[in-house]
Amino acid sequence: MKPLKPIENFIKRQSVSLPLMTVMFPVLYLGAEIGLIASGAVAAGTYLASNTTIKQVQLSSDSKNLGMTRSEFKNVRNQIKEGKDKIKQLQSNYYKVRSISSFKQLMDMTKIANKIITVVQQNPRKFYLAEPFFYSHLDSAIELTEKYTLLVGQPVKDRDMRVALQDTREMLLSLNKVMEQDLKQVLSSDVERLRMELDYAQLAVDKHNNKQQKLLVQPEPEHEGDVEDDRETINSK
């Protein structure tokens, strides 16, 4: 399963499109003699056409390798991009909270969100294990955090506002636990595979130990000249 590699794909596109444009311009300007502006426009058009074509080929190839349709693959890429933007929005509230515990909670939430994004980027098919995170939980985290920072920033805090602050803190704590479950969900197959690998490794170790044990309990070979029954040898003399 290949992870999403936007930077690598971008470099591949430029390694073809830029040299093509660089070659096209002097050919058109000096060879076809169509003028500086026209040559530049056609060369730029060649670059755009080449870049777009290669991008579509990469999209088809990547989606096929992942066992996904083009539309599914594009949706996952868009959700990852939007998720990263939302995490930046969440991080912008770091220094608006007024307590160490709230700051730490917000950092933990951001770390969890970043980890989910990273896992899905490495294995886009895991997006379907984290749909609630992308479509709901991350948005709720931003909404609640902004509400909390707004309330904290008010100069006057009456009883109703203090109650609202406490309710928001509790909701954020609950949401943090929900996002932890999202992370566990996307990592579930990895954990299961790790368990299988550990079980296989343990079987190999047990097999090796059993083999070593059998070698240790094997009787020593008889020395040269020994006979099965010494009494027969003695009586025969």
Image (tube, rainbow, N blue to C red):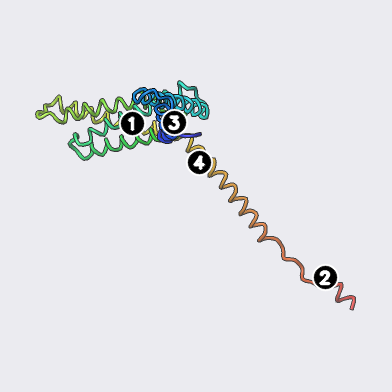
Q: Label 2, on which residue?
A: 227
- Mark 2 or 1: the one toward you: 1
Q: State the SS at label 2.
A: loop
Q: Residue at x 46, y 24 (%)?
A: 53
Label 2: few (<14), some or many (≥20) within 10 Å?
few
Q: State the SS at label 4.
A: helix
Label 1: few (<14), some or many (≥20) within 10 Å?
some
Lower position in the chain sequence, tag 3 or tag 2: 3
For this orientation, the residue located farthest to the top is 71
Q: How many marks overall?
A: 4
Q: Residue at x 32, y 27 (%)?
A: 138
- Mark 1 or 3: the one toward you: 3
> Is 86 displayed left or right of 185 in the figure?
left
Q: Residue at x 19, y 34 (%)?
A: 96
Label 3: few (<14), some or many (≥20) within 10 Å?
some
Q: Amino acid at mark 4?
A: Leu
Can residue 186 be seen?
A: no
Vertical order, 119 against 229 (above or below) = above
Residue 180's mark? none
For the residue pair 34 and 172, the one nearer the viewer reads as 34
Verify CB contact (< 8 Å) between mark 3 and mark 2. Answer: no
Quadrant location, the C terminus: bottom right
Marks 3 and 4, Cα distance to the nearest angstrom?
Answer: 47 Å
Marks 2 and 1, Cα distance to the nearest angstrom?
Answer: 83 Å
Q: Label 3, on which residue?
A: 20
For this orientation, the residue located farthest to the right is 236
Residue 194's mark? 4
Verify CB contact (< 8 Å) between mark 2 and mark 1. Answer: no
Asked where in the image residue 164 lies, by quadrant, the reply is top left
Q: Amino acid at mark 3?
A: Leu
Lower position in the chain sequence, tag 2 or tag 4: 4
- Mark 3 or 4: the one toward you: 3
